[in-house]
Image (spheres, rainbow, N blue to C red):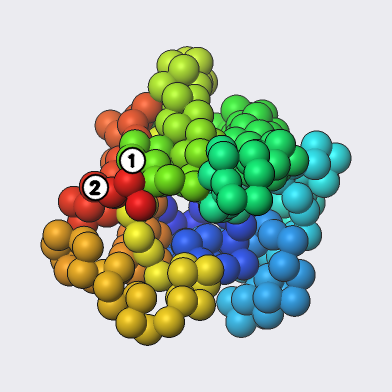
Amino acid sequence: MKSKNKVVIVAGGASGLGEATIRWFAGKGNRVVILDLAEEKGRKIARELGDNALFVKASVTEEKEMQAAVNTTIECFGRIDILVTCAGINSQDKVLGKKGVHPLDTFNNVIQINLVGTFNAIRLVSEQMAKNDPDDEGERGVIVCTSSAAAFEGQIGQVAYSASKGAINSMVLPIAREFASIGIRINAIAPGIFETPLLMALPENVLEALGRTVPFPNRLGRPVEFAQLVDSVVENTMINGEVIRLDGAIRMQAR
């Protein structure tokens, strides 16, 4: 699918990887929808990008809010061609920590936002994509989910996060097989250590040490590199049902 003159929704589009993706696709002449709970930041980005950008406040875990966001997008832009799911949270709780066992509410919250939220966005957006006229390749839409290197090498304290991202990986192929008949592709990208707002709050010496753990390039990943890969996945019709690592060949250690 050509990534120009399309309508792109990015869940979690007001910061980090999602913001970079929004700016990338807006820069290529697409209409973009910033779906996020961070209203002030989301509206600021939308104002910067102009009339082809829309902010919609919604939680990916809330069915009514997500459906309203989809409906608003259709009302404003008429269709949805690309969905990128970047909304997610992390946790650092051990199963048996110094303060006791892993809080069940924390585990559930990570699963709800990262996994259930991703699925909720996929199911509601794909319903609209299926109504699109197919292009010359028979394609009606493209979905790109955000996984993580932690899905493969989860570190101590990442049990909830790793479980949620591993489950996203497991969803990709069955959904790709189901959507093949209607011309919708779905893939996931598994980033390593990237310059996201949460990470960049760490001290400079810690960031430098983290960057040195990446074999090559010997630095942290840049959000624009994630956005660039999303674009490549969108443009290459043969990429379907895949989980693509984007990590500079890093393999995470136990801690």
Q: Amino acid at mark 1?
A: Glu
Mark 2 → mark 1, Cα distance in angstroms = 7 Å
Quick check: 78 above or below 133? below
Is 200 or 118 nearer to us in this picture? 200
Numbered marks: total: 2
Q: Is residue 171 left or right of residue 74?
A: left
Image location of residue 58, percent across then percent down: 77, 53
The tag earlier along the polypeptide, 2 or 1, is 1
Mark 2 and mark 1 residues within 8 Å of each other at the beta carbon:
yes
The part of the image, by quadrant, that contains residue 70 is: top right
Which label is found at residue 153? 1
Q: Quadrant of residue 44?
A: bottom right
Quadrant of the image containing the N terminus = top left
Q: Is residue 96 above or below residue 241?
A: below
Question: Which disc, if any, is residue 237?
Answer: none
Residue at 43% in and 57% down? 4
- Seen in the picture, residue 205 relative to 243 is either above or below; the reply is below
Residue ranking furthest to the left: 216
Circle on res. 251: 2
User: In the drawing, does residue 191 fall left or right of residue 18?
Assistant: left
Q: SS class of the residue under badge 2?
A: loop
Residue 87 in view, yes or no: no
Classify 10 Å Cα crowding around label 2: few (below 14), some (14-19), many (20 and above). Answer: some
